């Protein structure tokens, strides 16, 4: 079973890191080192592709892949929301003028 913990600060440009701790389907211990920093949509997309490939190869269960995929989707939405918030603030600072 894999246990997940996401660590992030809810500010714009927040540092988001996923940790996977536990064991693989075969019972082998997983590394506790963090995955690459997930601070852009492109990095989240790459991590999702890696996750998909691991599930296809049977390295992780479909259930674990689904749970991790949901967490990646959440992180992606948080990044998008932060980027939109930043753009709105910039527009408001200009007095609403483009």
Image (tube, rainbow, N blue to C red):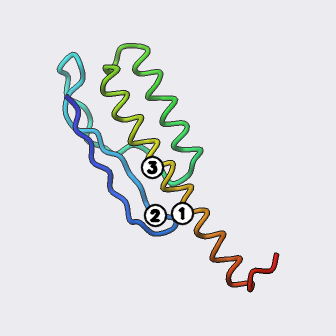
Mark 2, residues whose alpha carbon is within 10 Å: few (<14), some, or many (≥20)? some
Q: Which residue is mark 3?
A: 75
Going from N to C along the chain, the mark reached first, 1 or 3, is 3
Q: Which residue is mark 2?
A: 14
Indicate the quadrant where residue 59 lies.
top left
Residue contact between numbered discs 2 and 1, judged by CB atoms under 8 Å: yes
Q: Determine whether the residue tagged by mark 2 lies in a helix, strand or loop.
A: loop
Residue contact between numbered discs 3 and 2, judged by CB atoms under 8 Å: no
**Left-right relation of 38 to 92:** left
x and y, in percent, of residue 16 in the image: 41, 55
x and y, in percent, of residue 64 in the image: 31, 27
In the image, residue 72 above or below residue 14: above
Tell me the quadrant of the picture where the N terminus can be found: top left
Q: Which residue is mark 1?
A: 82
C-alpha separation, residue under disc 1 versus residue under disc 3: 11 Å
Q: Nearer the viewer, residue 78 or 8?
A: 78
The single residue placed furthest to the right in the displayed view is 98
**Left-right relation of 46 to 92:** left
Residue at 48%, 29% (x, y): give it: 50
């Amino acid at each position: 079973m894999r246990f997940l913990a996401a660590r992030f600060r809810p500010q714009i440009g927040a540092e988001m890191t996923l940790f996977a701790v536990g064991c693989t389907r075969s019972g082998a211990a997983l590394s506790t080192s963090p995955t690459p920093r997930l601070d852009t949509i492109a990095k989240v997309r790459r991590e999702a592709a890696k996750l998909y490939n691991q599930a296809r190869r049977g390295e992780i269960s479909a259930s674990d892949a689904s749970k991790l995929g949901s967490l990646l989707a959440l992180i992606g939405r948080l990044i998008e929301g932060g980027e939109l918030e930043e753009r709105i603030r910039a527009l408001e600072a200009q007095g609403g003028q483009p």
